[in-house]
Amino acid sequence: MHQAAFAAAGLSGWRYQRLPAPPELLDELVRALPGAGFRGANVTIPHKERALAIADRASVAALAIGAANTLTFAHDGTIEAENTDAPGLIAALPTPARGLRALVLGAGGSARACAWALREAGAAEVMVWNRSAERARALAEQLDVRAVADAPGADLLVNCTSVGLADPASTFKELPLAADTVGRFPFVVDLVYRDGDTALIAAAKAAGCRVVDGLEVLVRQGALSFERWVGAPASLDAMRSALRGDRDHHGQLDTDHSRAGFPGGRSDGDARPAGP
């Protein structure tokens, strides 16, 4: 995906590569990257909180969410932390968030990023549901949003859980709604990405909802990282084509970010640096 964006921008000498990053070596690895010529890096679970701590400076979003997925190396060697999960969601939405009532499913890092982003974008109300009511309440209190015990109708539904990834048939057994009630949400976003539509996206399409799948959110997050490193907009079309083309041609998702964005990736995490 990033290599396609580099090629579209004429940056033939740039490379985006994956590096294994055991937790005990993360600080040393990240601090060595600027001197090796890298411009930045994406970091994945479980390193997002530590990446924020390593940075010399951080954006408002990264500080508020408490995690960073994008690091940019300045010319003086200092490290800037950003969280593109939040603005990536807003950029992917097919309608402005302002004035919407939104229901966020989940209480982990991605749910925190999405709830914060929607609140900051002017949503009329942001509700949070989680299988653990205690975790939902804790997140709601921290972000000044509302915890709910079920799934009240709303304008926008955002699934930030991993439900449906390993076992699509379990989707509506584990989420607080049935397939035939998804139509109560005119807009549906599912951060899970897999071969073909998730069960939630399929039900939403059948109900006539406007949908955004996890791959589109991934493209938007990646484009924002690209812009920070390169200083110019990324080609969304090139990134989409590379990402969806890999899935279509190989029968599975096989991209730079294939282990990022949801639980189930490498237990020791990855760092994916970029640079000429």
Image: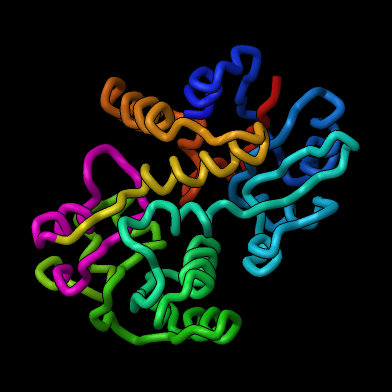
Judge whether 197 appears above or below 112 on screen.
above
Percent x, y of residue 42: 63, 40
Percent x, y of residue 263: 48, 52
Percent x, y of residue 271: 66, 37
Residue displayed at 39% across by 78% down:
129
Residue displayed at 37% across by 44% down:
216
Judge whether 158 appears above or below 190 on screen.
below
Residue displayed at 53% across by 54% down:
85
Furthest toward the top, the residue is 12
Residue displayed at 35% across by 27% down:
241
The front one of 7 and 250 is: 7
**Magenta stretch contains residue 206:** yes
Image quadrant containing the C terminus = top right
**Magenta stretch contains residue 37:** no
The front one of 24 and 211 is: 211
Judge whether 3 appears above or below 149 on screen.
above
Q: 169 left or right of 7?
A: left
Q: 33 left or right of 83?
A: right
Judge whether 17 appears above or below 156 on screen.
above
- The mark total stands at 0
Q: 116 left or right of 238?
A: right
Span colored in magenta: 182-208
